[in-house]
Amino acid sequence: MPKILLVEDNEMNRDMLSRRLARKGYEVVIAVDGGEGIAKARSEAPALVLMDMSLPVVDGWEATRILKADPTTQNIPIIGLTAHAMSGDREKCIAAGCDDYDTKPVEILRLLEKMQVQLVRTGHPPA
């Protein structure tokens, strides 16, 4: 069962997404800000990170750059989650180091497909 780190500060989004992922067979670890997300990515070694880009303490952009610069976490795929579905946002996420990007509100089937692509790419069987 792949371990997913969900970095999300909005309690409602966090609860909804973590329950849906758990029902699909994923082990979900939660962080509520970018600083905690960095620490948990290092300590929990998740198979994949779902990173809200608008976070307190350290935002998702900076947290992603830090994780991708760290040899112990640089190969963990990160999918950026943002409510900013503006032109250029996908490119901005990729430039920060995200391996993929998805918009909020999360469409769970679309997100699961993106997660599976990243998990297979990194040698982790999807749930």
Image (cartoon, rainbow, N blue to C red):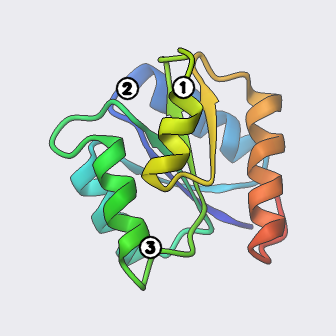
Q: Residue 46's mark? A: none
User: Nearer the observer, disc 1 or disc 3?
Assistant: 1
Few, some or many C-alpha atoms within 10 Å of disc 1 (few <14, some 14-19, many ≥20)? few
**Residue depicted at x 53% and y 33%:** 81
In terms of image quadrants, where is residue 105? Answer: top right
Evaluate if marks 1 and 3 touch, with contact meaning CB atoms under 8 Å apart. Answer: no
Distance of label 1 from label 3 (alpha carbons) = 32 Å
Amino acid type at image mark 1 = Gly
Mark before the other along the chain sequence, 3 or 2: 2
Which secondary structure lies at badge 3?
A: helix
Separation of marks 2 and 1 at Cα, in angstroms = 27 Å
Q: Quadrant of residue 69?
A: bottom left
- Closer to the camera, 102 or 22? 102
The disc labelled 2 sits on which kind of residue?
A: Glu
Query: What numbered label is drawn on residue 11?
Result: 2
Q: What is the CA distance from the residue labelled 3 to the residue labelled 2?
A: 21 Å
Q: Is residue 80 above or below residue 5?
A: above
Residue 44's label in the rendered image is: 3
Residue 54: % across, % down: 33, 30
Q: Which residue, given by chain and number where applicable, does mark 1 sit on? A: 88
* 47 over 99 or under it: above or below: below
Write the residue at 35% across / 43% down.
60
Q: Give left or right: position of 97 versus 90.
A: left
> In the rendering, at what x and y percent does residue 47 appear?
62, 68
Label 2 element class = helix
Residue 109: horizontal and vertical position, in percent? 83, 30
Q: Quadrant of residue 116?
A: bottom right
Q: Earlier in the sequence, mark 2 or mark 1?
A: 2
Residue 25, percent from left and from top: 76, 53
